[in-house]
Amino acid sequence: MKRKRPSTVVVKVEYDVEEPPAASDEMDTMPSTPTAEVKTEPFPAVTETSSSAVEVKTEPFPAVTETGSSAAVTEKSMMADKSGTSTRRPVFKRYSALEALQEVLNDNDSGDDDFGGLDESDSDDDETDSNQHHPLLSEVEGDEDEDDPNFEMETESDSESDAAELSDHANPSTSPASPPVVRGRGRGRGSGQRQSSSSRGRGGGMGRGARQLDLISEWKVADARPPNADITFTANPGIKCNVDNFGPADYMELFFDDDLMNHLVIQTNLYAHQFLEAHLNLPEFSRANKWEPVDAAEMKKFLALMLLMGIVKLPAIELYWSQKVLYRIPVFSSVMTRNRFQIILQFLHFHDNTKMPLPNDPEYDRLYKIRPVLDHLFEKFQEVYEPRQAVCVDESLLLWKGRLIFRKYIPLKRARFGIKVYQCCESDGMVKESGGYCYRFKVNAGKEDPVNEVQPVLQAVDADNPSMSASEKMVLFLVAPLLNKGYHVYTDNWYSSLRMYLYLLEKKTLACGTVRENRGVPLELHGVKPPPGSSTALCGDGKIVATKYHSTKMVHLLSTVQGHTEAAIPDKRGRGVNKRPQVSTKYNGNMGGVNKQDQLLHPYDCSRKSMKWTKKLFFHFFQVAAVNAFILSKSGDNSSKTFLIFLESVICSWLWPDNVPVVKRNKTDDEVRLTARHFIFPIPATPSKTNPQKACRVCTKKHKIRRDVRYYCPFCPSKPALCFPQCFMDYHTKFVYWQ
């Protein structure tokens, strides 16, 4: 096979060389000042050879020499025209695509001071914070996350990968005064280079982290003692309502109660009425012409069928009512007709469109169309249950690829595109079928959303400070009701920072999590490189422990929960024993609350592809409520051993409130026509027709023509009309009779 020629990039290089003045007797008396620019870096000289290729030599070109009072330019650097004036000489060099990229990277690493990062000596001392709501938070620099146009691109990463990305290039022999320069990810200001201590901002490196380090006066070698053993857990976890003799449906109705059901009924009927008034000239056979108001009992059946669709998955809604033997599920047709289900789904609504504020209104809410449902579940989740001591803060991404102003792109998530939801969930503690209860949540509607419920909560907990970053504010919003109770909060490296952990410590709330190197890791750990399978830890002022653990990568952790102890873990490849810090084990065991919820939801996801994002978000939170109800049922010693059994009980209770009837399953033509005995009969007469006729089923499907006949088979369930004898024989002897 012919090898493809690699693509090339042609780079044009022009050299500006000032012409030396003409020689004269007066120049001897002039001051000895060079008039040409002196270039100390070598440039490639291009010479032509016998072949068509271009040979690149390494001697300097153009070379400039100083001779007394004048600068002589080498003959190779100039071309004189007939008039005697000098011109520019363009030089070309041919690069492959890979060589051109390497050349650009080498230029960026050349140390050009004109485009370097900011020096901390020129700005750290002349910035003051006018809004000092808290003495701890007033001394640190503001986070640049909110000003970054690529804010969401960097939010998602593995809990242990991005935290160690900066430390992989650290040099143990380098002193803190002259730290090594490592490449950033181009998110900050400047040349895209990241320095360990001299530049500022997220893309610039350690500016913000260095200012956070001022919050700790002294770092010492950490020991095994917990840094904050005096903080005790004072909350009363568990169910906060009477659940005696509760079944699965009763737990579900703690969240989807009568108030919410009646709201759905009212808004759905209202939207259907508004739609029909606005569309008076609908087609004759439109489903909307047969709309009848829905009630609460029918709405429950509709939602139960949606849950059942999450268990029994078919590619299209119409197939659930199909009479084909491959798809036939009799429970759907016995509960509700297909047209009735689809028209309820069409008019399902959650808020009155006529009262929606305009986009330029200060009260405009991007989540207005689903706000009543979100507010109801937000309050119910906190009202019914108090989580155990360990909680985690993380985010999930609901798949949505349609047009939406606050749609996020997170490449490391499974969905990649969708609606981002922040959640505070109860940690599972590495206990099977434990944890995952969603205590609080926040749908990310964009940083420019006028309606922001985060600020009032932050003001209430004295954390509404401009220096707090967006990720730190989100953590404080989600755990606000749990402060001052001794809870343990686990976060990943997008949320964690030294100043937030110290703030939580003042609120008698401990925290643990991975952290990025520029968010408060002490400078003493930057140049340290522990051997693989070992760790190094420092304790700051006796209240927070910073750990650097060499796993597959360098991982940084901050903790106010755990001291520095190590456990011997056998190496996976049988190469000895690794020493894993207990803070890493504790983090891994308590950071899976949100993931646990996603694992329960994924196999039974009932949200379907839709043109309206509000419906997909509604069905997502409908199932989140089902997961919360399942966790409550297990806490109340209910007999539902798995989430599937719990869903089955809820579906049966909502479909048949009194008892579960036996669904009569009528046989279809495909099951009968090839096995039983069949005979042909003339179609019986009717009061209006003495010789009635019907279209032959085989001719209609096989030949795509309508042929009326007078004979049919009364022994088939659908009593089809058939031509005699060929069509009658094909229908009762061939399963695929239309081929």
Image (tube, rainbow, N blue to C red):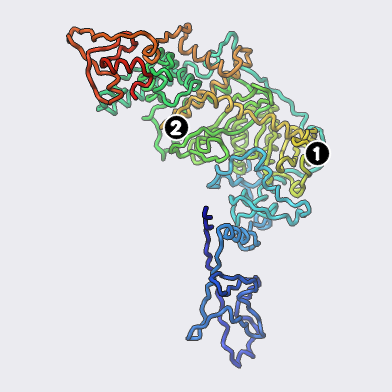
Circle 2 residues within 10 Å: few <14, some 14–19, many ≥20: some
| Spot occupied by residue 616 in the image (x, y as percentages of width and height) | 46, 29
User: What element does badge 2 sit on?
Assistant: helix
Marks 1 and 2 in Cβ contact (< 8 Å): no
Q: Nearer the viewer, residue 491 or 89?
A: 89
Residue located 63% across and 26% down the image:
426
Q: Quadrant of residue 494?
A: top right
**In the visual, does 645 lie left or right of 300?**
right
Residue 222 is labelled as 1
Q: Quadrant of residue 613?
A: top left
| Spot occupied by residue 703 in the image (x, y as percentages of width and height) | 28, 25
| Spot occupied by residue 554 in the image (x, y as percentages of width and height) | 72, 43
Can residue 510 be seen at all in this image of the molecule?
yes
* Residue 22, above or below 117: below
Q: Disc 1 or 2, which lies upstream in sequence?
A: 1
The amino acid at mark 2 is Trp
Q: Nearer the viewer, residue 283 or 124?
A: 283
**In the visual, does 720 lie left or right of 387?**
left
Q: Quadrant of residue 463?
A: top right
Real-space CA distance between mark 1 and mark 2, rounded to the nearest whole angstrom = 50 Å
Residue located 61% across and 27% down the image:
596
The amino acid at mark 1 is Ala
